[in-house]
Image: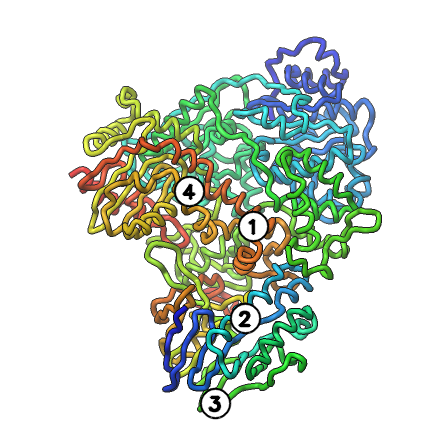
Amino acid sequence: MKPHPIRLCGQEFLLDPAGALVWPKRSALVVADLHLGKADALARRGLLAPPYELEETLARLEALVVRYRPEIVVSLGDGLHDAGAAQALESQRFDRLGALVRRQRWLWVTGNHDPVVPIALGGAVLPRFVCDGLTFVHVPSGAAAEVAGHLHPVARVATPAGPVQRRRCFVGDGERLLLPALGTFAGGLDVLDPAIAGLFPGAFTAYLLGARRIFAVSSRRLVREPDPRRHRLQAGRSSPRSLA
Amino acid sequence: MTDAPCAAHAPLDGLASLPARFVAWFSARGWRPRAHQLAMLALAREGRDALLVAPTGGGKTLAGFLPSLVELAREGGGCGIHTLYVSPLKALAADIARNLETPIREMGLSVRIAVRTGDTSPAQRARQRRRPPDILLTTPESLALMLSYPDAAERFRGLRAIVLDEVHALAESKRGALLALGVARLRSLAPDARIVGLSATVADPDALCRYLSPEPRSVALVRGEAGAPPEVEILIPDARMPWAGHYATHAAAAILELVRRHRTSIVFVNTRAQAEVLFGLLWRLNEDNLPIALHHGSLDAEQRHKVERAMARGGLRAVVATSSLDLGIDWGDVDLVVQVGAPKSVARLLQRIGRANHRLEEPSRAVLVPANRFEVLECLAAREALAEAALDGGAIVAGGLDVLAQHVTGVACAGPFDADRLYEEVRRAAPYAALARSDFDAVLDFVATGGYALGGYERYRRLVRGSDGLWRLADPRLACRYRMNIGTIVEAPVMHVRLGPRGRRLGEVEEYFVSTLAPGDTFLFAGRLLEFVGVREDEVVVRAAKRARDPKVPTYAGGKLPLTDTLATRVRRILATRERWPQLPAPVREWLEAQIRRSSAGEAEELLVETFPRRGRHFLVAYPFAGRNAHQTLGMLLTRRMERLRLAPLGFVASDYCIAVWGRVPIERPEELFTADLLADDLEEWMAESTVLRRAFRNCAVVAGLVERRLPGREKTGRQVTMSTDLLYDVLRKYEPDHVLLRAARAEAAQGMIDLGRLSDLLNAIQGRIRHERLSRISPFAVAIIAGIGKEFVGGEALDQELEAAVAELLAEAMA
């Protein structure tokens, strides 16, 4: 596992291939969109997804904490999948999460999924975290010096002798950075989708998560996810001719 | 009925068993009952199960229904469903119902018939419930649906006969597994019902007997009279034969000429894209405005019905069709069948040819139109096989655990059940005859709780076991969800195509194809040249286009049959038998002779492997003739091994006949690649990573009911819980590699997409028999496959004209 160094607003950071941002100067580990308890939320709605989501996400998180021994962990929003998730977590795994939270300082930045973080879990709860001129927030605004999650970016690259590879990724342009979702059952949004690409004034880089290292690919070399609804017609137009 | 059962050699005692008004009806029509019709009648009186194997035009359907009509005439109806008929096609069920009305009316029988398919309105269904018909015609999916209602036992208790039509077309498939489970259920509900299978001529009728009954020896096999052997011609217009491509655009004018010279023709093609292209070409040449129509499964149902009606009343001169017209249905007076492109399977070709001339005594006429030189060989092989009546196919495959999960859920929806008894019942379905109890229990556990070793879902259980030991549904609402997800066919997501924002619907194209379109792009669909305007909600809005330089053609996933073993063996034999070459059509003969001057054609028991450099790359082309799926797998495995041997592979491409791989380093010793351990070494690892297994997993997850089927419009209501099955797959593989759904996915992939059996037979057969031709340039055989490289553009396949340029260049090299 080889972390990939980048500069963000003049500061040094590392991108870990597991999908975490490391800030050596502040001894901070930043992760986004853990969506803990999503399997259980799915099961409540009738989809009996493999119940290993929590175990797998916690294992990823524990490995990162062991690797970097940070002084602070920042969960950049949507740490818990929904309000019901925390209640539904079985006590044993709740303890495992609690132990991880209490191992160092822990900051829950609130997201759209988890406005309420149970106090029993430990850690501090903040709507955003500002440090050294950088803002860590769940929903990105496109402003400079911002580190955000929420969008679950994925990117696709063509390979010479095989199919297109689709991977979770960081997205950055030196001024702003989006984190991939760390949650096992988190879906993905193509970085070329306007919701992501529109946050960047110019070209950007996707840092794809490989098994052992990061692959940095310019946005110009990415392959767009097939989107059958890309050319949506505006409502209210009566004749297709008017589009011509 | 669909056919005129004349030319009877009916034994008199058989005839005597027929009630007077039946005899009168036959003679009023100038017919006499056929021997097999009377045989079916006699067997029914004994209550025996029967399989009737007869060619099309043999009065097969009437033979299946005659005993029921006689019984109903004698005993009177109105006591619940007497006969249940299951057809693979909705349209066939409706057609048979219409055709049955005639004898019933003419004989004045008081027999009530009803059709129950996905097209049946809720009001009609309610009526059928209140007053059950005597004869109910349905499909495997609708049968599964009916069996899932609590009143199923009541409804089917008095069943006397179950008729499975076109059973050969169902038995081999995943749908056949679902139907077999449904029939096993019916047999438990109505133990006295006899079962009747109706089948076209097949290679292995014993397998079908096993499919019909757990005691195959109790099934009487009745054979219809053999028809006159078909007359089959191979069309090579103006001695021109393309080197590559599948569209046979060169033959359009000749096909039109055939249409002109016949009353009614069906022009069969292999894919919907081919149908669109050929239809467009025919109309461009059709100066006499002959009524020629188009029929395929993605066209709007209204449009298809219109074509079917026009065809039945003789209003069409030709219809260009895919497998959507393979089965059943009375087509009026078809006097010519044209098969464009390789036949791929002898059984299917025979089925298609049988669409022409529903009269037994006259031979059916068929013309095969090969689209390239390899296809000529395949057509010759198919014609030979037909003449020798050497069919392929007909084997029953082991039933999937995902299908079983769907069935178990359905049983639970109908009411409480006992696991031991259900296990015994399931094993009476042939595809599950060898099902282990542990597998059954794993499926039951999956249905109940998701079947995970880490049993975390007690509170979300779908099935509970009561103190009476019976399993029942935990929440009655689950039954609604189940009923929305019945069926074993998982299609790629599609969007409706609408001509103008308020115009009519033309049909469906796959979402993937839509994602490749930009406004202004043109494509061929529903026999029209269309311009893409945009997407509104879930519909593709198009308008008619005047002209276009390179219109795209929508392609559809799946449906491509690989070349069968029977045909492949015959093709190889033609290549290896030099004495036969002089009788081959000139372009093919010249091609083969050019090939042996520059390389070799291979002996029957050999694998021909050519290596040659081209434009700084090093190619290897092998000719196993093992079918596209097996070759795809072989390509993946070869490139993996080349990587390990540091041969720097860059890509591969596969066809039904051969496989080409290329890299940066010359391959000196191909035998190092094609070793018998190729499968053992890499397969496990590759399968786990491959998209093939992910796709199979998605199918199984939908069929088994882990995730819901994506239905247009349902996303909007938000009632659907979906989730990327890839994420589920990754986690499951890591934490529970033996989960029942992963096992189902591996089995499905191995059977179909990967074609493991054939690949392993191939690798074993060729050890020590590789004939390596080291060439300085491309060979004539290799031209077709190399020309196709890079031409499989997104959302479509290269059309012939695009291949032509590539071929011209390659030919110059090959023949230099």
- Could you say which quadrant of the image residue B338 lies in? top left
Check if mark 3 and mark 1 are on a common chain.
no
- For residue B199, the mark is none
Q: Residue A112: horizontal and vertical position, in percent?
A: 59, 78
Residue located beneath label 2 in the image: A236
At label 2, which amino acid type do we have?
Gly
Q: Residue B245: horizontal and vertical position, in percent?
A: 34, 41
Query: In the rendered image, which quarter contains the N terminus of chain B?
Result: top right
At label 1, which amino acid type do we have?
Leu
> In terms of depth relative to the viewer, which is nearer, B740 or A236?
B740
Residue B342 relative to residue B707: left or right:
left
Check if mark 2 and mark 3 are on a common chain.
yes
Per the model, the C-alpha gap separating discs 3 and 4 is 55 Å
Per the model, the C-alpha gap separating discs 2 and 1 is 47 Å
State yes or no: discs 2 and 1 in contact (Cβ < 8 Å).
Answer: no
Q: Residue B144: horizontal and vertical position, in percent?
A: 69, 43
Q: Earlier in the sequence, mark 4 or mark 1?
A: 4
The chain letter for the residue carrying disc 1 is B
Residue B483 relative to residue A80: left or right:
right
SS assignment at label 4:
helix
At label 3, which amino acid type do we have?
Cys
- For residue B679, the mark is 4
Residue A53 relative to residue B484: left or right:
left
The chain letter for the residue carrying disc 2 is A
Which mark is nearer the camera, 3 or 4? Answer: 4
Within 10 angstroms of label 1, few (less than 14), some, or many (20 or more) residues?
many
Q: Who's the residue at 30% across and 41% down the image?
A: B672
At label 4, which amino acid type do we have?
Leu
Residue located beneath label 3 in the image: A131
Where is A117 relative to B149, above or below? below
Within 10 angstroms of label 3, few (less than 14), some, or many (20 or more) residues?
few
Residue located beneath label 1 in the image: B742
